[in-house]
Amino acid sequence: MFTPPQALYFPPDPSVIDVRKEFGAKGDGRADDTDALQKALDASCGTQGKTRVLFLPKGTYRLTKSLVIKNALGPWLYGQSRDQVILKLDDGAKDVTAVLRTHPSEKGPTSADWFMRNVYNLTIDAGNNPNTDGVRWYATNSGILKNVKVIGNGKIGVNAGFLDQSGPNLIQDVDITGFETGILSQWIWGETLSRIKIKNCRKNGVVVSANAVAIEDLTVENTPQPISIERPNDWGHWSGVVALVGATFSGHDVKSPPISNQGVLYARDVTMNRAPQPEQLVPARKTLGGGESTLLPIRPEPVVPWETNPRKWVCIDDFGARANDNDDDTPAFQRAIDEAARRGATTVYLRGCGGPEPNWHVLRGTVRVHGSVRRVMGLGWGRILGIEGGGFVVDDTSAPVVQFMNIDSFGGPPPTLTNRSKKRALVVESCGVSVIGEGAGPIFMTNCPAQVNLKTPGQSLWARQLNPEGASDDGLVKNNGGKLWALGVKCEGKGIRFSTKNNGRTEIYGAFMYSSHDTESDKRSMFEVTGASLSVFGLREISFTQICFPVKIKTPEKTITSQDEGGWIGWSRYDISGR
């Protein structure tokens, strides 16, 4: 059972915006805090130079119009308590489409370049406004809406389709009450829903249209239609694709199936108060392969305790690290971690980057995380380039669980995060890095545009919203004898996406493969399986050049190639054993 943190705190530091102290927000439910919060959001995104964390202490922040995230990067928004930090829109607000909108535009078209949306630990109250959404959510490659409650009587609780684009991003530990529809996930790049609770919606719980969506642990109560998978404009080739892993439906309309499916669906572990016919729940669709799936155990990410004592936070910048000189910061990072371990501190942080380049830290060597240090994070955009394999290592001297947050190379060579321990857990959240397994300790990844290499047989990894990109001859995600479970995967580019070897087991729920092939001569496969097994449930391929992956799967025994599907295709299931 996943238990989210109850309260968050940050140290007094220039990289932290306290919205009350710096921008004068009252949080008393009476004063209009709209302008103060808008200025604070802009500052978090780096309009004053560096990106920064925006911290909202407990209180009710009265709003009279939408809060809008206008910048391409950010914000890093954290409420102190989910239930005690409330963004409350006035009843009867005029011309307000949403309490929070994470894009400057109300409608498309737009680019796919809006990164690092981070919204944590608060309540969004849309009030008595029948035409207003709770959140208009848009984020690409890395974006997380986590431990958030959304309430109101408006149109959509979380509208992830208002721009006719969406994702990839993650909506996790979100509770939605009221509205006409709980979540709309619509058009193109894939989305991941993890541990979602929806109740008392007037029409729909989750609507998926022209998108590939992975869903885990969904609860829908007292809502007529729990899930609706639709096709826009009667385009059968571009319908919704859903992989559903665990759901509970109650109080829905018993006269119709709880999952209305016009697209592609794979579902398992679904409980409801009316059993549908098999053809209603999982209609016949094309499949590839023919091997038997082997279901891996599912584990939630460990909750790393949040440090509430400011004396146990250590700033890397105070030990000589500089984000704008291109010098090797490995010694400074190691000095900071060594000092934190000596003092019994738990959290080591770097101030957010921003402004003109160079605006990054450089690691040319290995930084060992040890002792009491259990979290390394950027307060804002923690930009680090890993030169020639530079990065961090977790080993048997590390804390039982070590988490990295808000670290991203963003176009440069990514730093490596390596778990070399026998049993320590590595937790990676909202990081654009390269994750390496060289031990036996478990690895957890959440909201990561990252590549993976499980080098050690027997090592396990659980990922939620994994977005590896680029061209590869040997695999963006490599599993050499490990156990790899992924909920929500988006890949982009040519060459091998996932390589599984040496008795490894790979299991993917909800995959979006964006191919840029313009010729069928590329013989590199989307999936390579050698002496191992692979299962993929709910897969969408698209190609705007009208050629999807020419080679789907390659094993020593067979090669599965394109079947003249053109540039758009959805599969409900792959099962492959390659010996």
Image: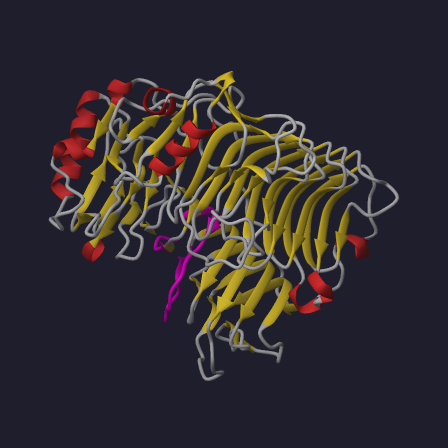
Task: In the rendered view, tell whether residue 278 sits above or below residue 331.
Answer: below
Quadrant in the rendering for residue 218:
top right
When the figure is inspected, residue 537 is found, relative to residue 399, above or below; the finding is below
Q: Could you tell me which residue is drawn at 50 percent across and 27 percent down? A: 122
Locate residue 572 relative to residue 490 in the image: left or right: right
- How many marks can you see? 0
At 15% from the left and 41% from the top, the residue drawn is: 322
Its colouring scheme is secondary structure
Q: In what quadrant of the picture does the N terminus appear? A: top right
Q: Nearer the viewer, residue 303 or 546?
A: 546
Given the current orientation, which residue lies at the most extreme right position? Answer: 255
Query: Does 480 lie within the magenta span?
Result: yes
Q: Residue at x 26, y 57 (%)?
A: 413
Residue 424 visible, this orientation? no
The verdict on residue 171 being magenta is no
Residue 341 lies, in percent from the top left, at 21, 27
In the image, residue 460 lies at what x, y percent?
A: 43, 47
Viewer-proximal residue among 459 and 123:
123
Task: Point out the stretch of residues depicted in magenta.
Answer: 453-481
Q: Nearer the viewer, residue 450 or 154?
A: 154
- Where 437 falls versus 88 (above or below)? below
Q: Position of residue 163 (x, y in %)?
A: 56, 53
Residue 432 shows in this picture:
yes
